[in-house]
Image (spheres, rainbow, N blue to C red):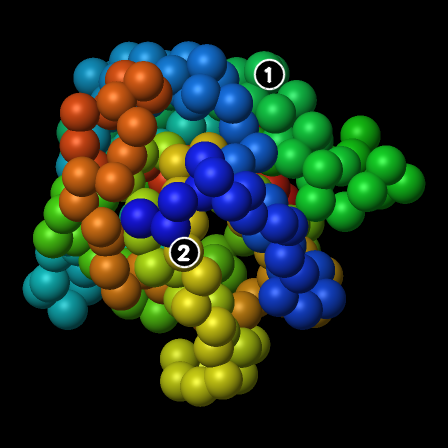
Amino acid sequence: MSGDALFPREPVALGPGAVHLPGWLPVERQRTLVDACRAWARGPVPLRRTALPGGGVMSVQTVCLGWHWLPYRYSRTADDVNGAEVAAFPDWLTELGRSALVAAYGERYEASGYNPDAALVNFYDGAARMGMHQDKEEHSAAPVVSLSIGDSCVFRFGNTEGRGRPYTDVELGSGDLFVFGGPARFAYHGVPKVYPGTGDPATGMSGGRLNITLRETGLAG
């Protein structure tokens, strides 16, 4: 833990389009999101570990809104789980995403044009990891909005050319906002480590980390 209550962390720009705003979500809003995530995790498509084409299984558990992500495409139905149509993407989450972009990019940013239609909710237990990857199944270059709740983690934010260096390791804590768009939109990124027991119980999380990413797919239908 970094003692953030005594020494508030400052917003950091990791490069053009990539912004980290520590503690952006107040605890009350985090708890509301935790309650919503629990409801989404119950279905119609339940929380699951995604099977990869090569036979591996992801260590994070995921539930989707709006569009279902499966390697490496989107579908309206969870064809790799139970075939059900995924839960709808709520309007209030759109507004939260727009507020996040204004916070990250400034009041002059035209956030009204941001229309996210998919959310990936990832749950990390203490052993879960996420390898370096690009978010590139979307047909839109709109920014990705990432919200963290619960245990802190190491977030590795890299370059657009490959999984290796250069990259920057950032500690993401509960309530942190991370936005990447523009030149950073297709940067490789991952989570090599979670710090168990670092979350605030006031959020409603008894352990683990929730990561909610909002995306604009650019898909029709």
Q: Is residue 20 above or below residue 111?
A: below
Q: Nearer the viewer, residue 35 or 112?
A: 35
Q: Quadrant of the C terminus?
A: top right
Residue 10 x, y percent position in the rendering: 62, 49
- Can you tell which quarter of the image residue 19 is in? bottom right
Residue 155 x, y percent position in the rendering: 39, 59
Q: CA distance from mark 2 to mark 1?
A: 30 Å
One can see residue 34 in this view: no
Q: Which residue: 46% across, 28% down?
A: 66
172 horizontally vs 201: left or right:
right
- Can you tell which quarter of the image residue 37 is in? top left
Residue 14 x, y percent position in the rendering: 62, 66
Q: Which residue: 67% across, 69% down?
A: 15
Q: Nearer the viewer, residue 192 or 21?
A: 21
One can see residue 27 in this view: yes
The residue identified by callout 1 is 91
Q: Which residue: 48% across, 17% down?
A: 29
Residue 49 x, y percent position in the rendering: 15, 44
Q: Nearer the viewer, residue 186 or 171?
A: 171
Q: Tell me the kind of residue under disc 2.
A: Glu
Q: Which residue: 56% across, 66% down?
A: 186
Say which mark, if any, is on residue 171.
2
Do the CB atoms of the residues marked 2 and 1 lie less than 8 Å apart?
no
Secondary structure, mark 1, is helix
Q: Is residue 162 above or below residue 107?
A: below
- Can you tell which quarter of the image residue 113 is in? top right
Say whether disc 2 or disc 1 marks the residue closer to the N-terminus.
1
Q: Is residue 69 above or below residue 52?
A: above
Secondary structure, mark 2, is strand
Q: Tell me the kind of residue under disc 1.
A: Asp
Say which mark, if any, is on residue 138.
none
Number of numbered discs visible in the structure rendering:
2
